Image: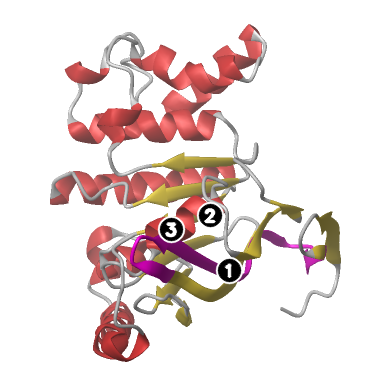
Amino acid sequence: MSNTTTKTNRGPKTGVIEVPEDVALSVQHLKKVYQTDGGEIEAVRDLHFDIRAGEFVCLVGPSGAGKTTLLKCIAGLLAPTSGLVALDGRLVTGPPKGLAVVFQEYGRSLFPWMNIRDNVELPLKNQGVAKDERDRLVDDALEAVGLAHVPKSYPWQLSGGMQQRVAIARAIAYQPKVLLMDEPFAAVDAQTRADLEDLVRRVWKRLGITVLFVTHDIDESVYLGERVVVLSSSPTVVQEDLTIDLPADRDQLETRSMARFTELRGHVYEQIQRAKAEAPNRTSSTPTV
């Protein structure tokens, strides 16, 4: 990047961490090796990329490419073998306060005995946020995802798409600097998925947060992202970091019918196929992680 201003912090293993001032999330030469009964399995190899504050980046790759391993390292749930993750210039050594995650299995993340409002409010309670502030944040989050009319309903009374909206509301009520989304729409129908895609873009624009969105859906990655980071087969590296030069305002019908959208989708598809073709040359033992 051309911006030379940096944020500097010291980490226990890596010394000085320097990232450009406008970078919210930095993954630097990340490597993860699993120890198994059959020996070492390298899942992620020398993976690095930066995401600027307020940017929407999608991450795609072949099945078993190490996307979940990468997300766990970014979220502080898994320690890398080497390399580092920095959030706002600070080394991630555990779950960082400024980061929230929305998972694919949203039903398991919601407590069925709690109503919608209580589910969204729970992380704020755990953080000791004052009640007046909690009320404001929950109200804003429910309004942002179109659920202000059902605060007293329970998760089991809502459709799958609405339950996923609850999970998104809970994440944004937490006011994260970075929002990680791990294939969050994989379990819903196509129409609901399109609605949720547009919802996430509206929330992203409204709140100005940084989003890293993991998906298997190539069309979805091109429609949502300002950039698409394509991963290789495992052991994983960044195969390509592609700028998505589509209009900032996007529409499911108009955007997806653009010639440029078709070109970008085809390019990402070619990269995924290339990654699959090169897989046998990368390793003979690849885990699905």
Mark 3 in CB contact with mark 2 (< 8 angstroms): yes
- Tell me residue 194's x, y (percent): 24, 51
Residue 227 disc label:
none
Instruction: Tell me the crowding category of disc 3: few under 14, some 14 to 19, or many 20 or more residues within 10 angstroms, Cα based.
Output: many
Examine the rendering and report whether any part of residue 136 can be seen. Answer: no
How far apart marks 3 and 2 lie (CA) works out to 6 Å
Residue receiving disc 3:
69
- Tell me residue 82's x, y (percent): 62, 66
Residue kind at label 1, given as amino acid type: Leu
Q: Residue at x 26, y 59 (%)?
A: 252
**Left/right of residue 58 with respect to residue 63 in the rendered view:** right
How far apart marks 2 and 1 lie (CA) works out to 9 Å
How far apart marks 3 and 1 lie (CA) works out to 11 Å
Q: Which residues are magenta?
A: 16-42
Residue kind at label 2, given as amino acid type: Cys
Disc 3 is placed on an element classified as helix
Instruction: Tell me the crowding category of disc 2: few under 14, some 14 to 19, or many 20 or more residues within 10 angstroms, Cα based.
Output: many
Residue receiving disc 1:
30
Residue receiving disc 2:
73
